[in-house]
Image (tube, helix red, strand yellow):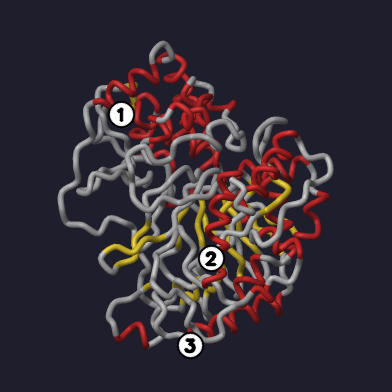
Amino acid sequence: MNGVASNQPLQAFPPHYVDLKKEITKGKEEAIVASWKALLEELEVRTKTIEEIGSNYIPQVDFASLSKLSQAEIDKIKSAGSVVIRNIVDDEEAVGYQEALKEYVKANPQVHGFPEVTLAAKFRGDKQFFEMYWSSSQLRARSHPNVLAAGVFLNNLYHAEENDIIDPNHNLIYADRFRIRHPSKGSWNNHPPHIDGASTERWEDPEMRKAFQDILNGNWKNHDPFGMAGRLNGISNMFGRPNQTSMFRSWQGWLAMSNTGPGEGTLRVFPSVQLSNAYIMLRPFFRPVDKSLKGDAYLDASNWVFDVSSPDIPGIQIMPSGHFTGVRPTDEEHPHLRLDSAIVSIPRVQPGDMVFWHVGRPQTPLIRESGQLMIRPDVLLDVVHSVEQYHHGPEDSSAMYIPAVPLTPKNVRYLARHRDQFLKRLPPPDFPQTELGESQFTNKGSETDITTFQGRMAMGLESFEVPVNATKGAQQAIKEANAILTGAV
């Protein structure tokens, strides 16, 4: 499921990546070296702090307090690139979602999911990650007023200029799946530390590079992970990688439907998006002098030298198919991130809480290849994250994936197709397609599960209204969105 299921040899990086590295760093070598040394010093301090504080390093706020947060609290959320928002949905309602989903799975055992070890397993209830999109629970949760409001809050943490064609005050619905992970002594190795996205495009596409320009200029302290530059118009698929995601998501997220804490199969994140971005982006320009050194001596800045003679980009591989993987940090290739200790589990969540982490571009759904579920090599998701290998808790760890999605013309083009698939109960366009989808499923959801006008707008079932004080760019985005939804363009 990590997308590296082949025993075939990996391909070597083409030599033109040496030229690319030289082009990016030309005339800025000294600034980049000085910046790298300062970055390593800051990482040493920050990773130790994260390790000491643990899960509580990740900000936790109550939904009812979102409009009252201080600037310091908002800055903490943005710095961590992750947040737990508590009490978005009533506890009993969230638990009810889970129970109804279990019944929906039970009524439709033919559904694809993971793991699928054998054909028999499909009918034994062994699956824990389900390719279902249109249940009543999912439709109600995605269109819940509080869920949409949380998305609007998170969208607005990004900085849009007056003329940027985006409206953060309309949060769109993006259908995704859910998991009901069972306690087990076995290991779940499907999601080691990774950044779901933008492979070489982070360096190679001039427009996408704008999102990291301060880093590449030797000024990583000025890097703003929440700026729109490069994020709306960057080319995320320069080389025709198959099955790419279609929506710009500001944050990926999931709604807890169970009581789940550290050690119970939950999400883990590296809670410093500025530092991880800076390190990932600068790492290809440096190599260790003496690989035999250990511990602090190996990590010390004096053991690392600026070198653009190799075409390799640490953490990215070229698969036998010729496609690049996303960035997959490892202790070997990204040692200063101290992945063993500085990626921390999110705090314990209760039903109705939501967890969000910084995306900044489309994230990575699954594709089905040769009958197997695999992660797509996708585009710009900034937070390094993973999923705990073990679930030693007393109950299922259940979550419904619901991201924050601002209104943009590109997003609404997808929304229109997504809406049409919903009306047929077929899988959303970004996900593995089946001939009948859920159209023949027992107890599938319906339009009546989307009970508010706000929810119907978010689903593309109603035209969008222009909010008060909308920017010129937002007004233009809404105008284009309504034309798309009605088929006028």
Residue under numbered circle 2 = 262
Depth check: 124 or 143 in front? 143
Q: Amino acid at mark 3?
A: Lys
Q: State which tag comes first along the sequence, 1 or 3.
A: 3
As drawn, is 483 to the left or to the right of 274?
A: right
Determine the residue positioned at 62% across, 59% down.
173
As drawn, is 47 to the left or to the right of 465?
A: left
User: Which quadrant would residue 98 be assigned to in this image?
Assistant: bottom right
Determine the residue positioned at 28% across, 27% down.
17
What is the CA distance from the residue labelled 1 to the residue labelled 3?
53 Å
Q: State which tag comes first along the sequence, 3 or 2.
A: 3
- Pick out the residue farthest to the top: 27
Count neighbours of disc 2 (C-alpha within 10 A) and say few if under 14, some if 14 to 19, many if 20 or more. many
Secondary structure of residue under mark 2: loop
Q: Amino acid at mark 2?
A: Pro
Residue 287's mark?
A: 1
The image shows residue 245 at horizontal and vertical percentages of 45, 51
Residue 106's mark?
A: 3
Determine the residue positioned at 68% across, 56% down.
60
Residue 114's mark?
A: none
Depth check: 437 or 341 in front? 437
User: Which quadrant would residue 296 be assigned to in this image?
Assistant: top left
Q: Is residue 2 above or below residue 295?
A: below
User: Which quadrant would residue 100 be assigned to in this image?
Assistant: bottom right
Q: Amino acid at mark 1?
A: Arg
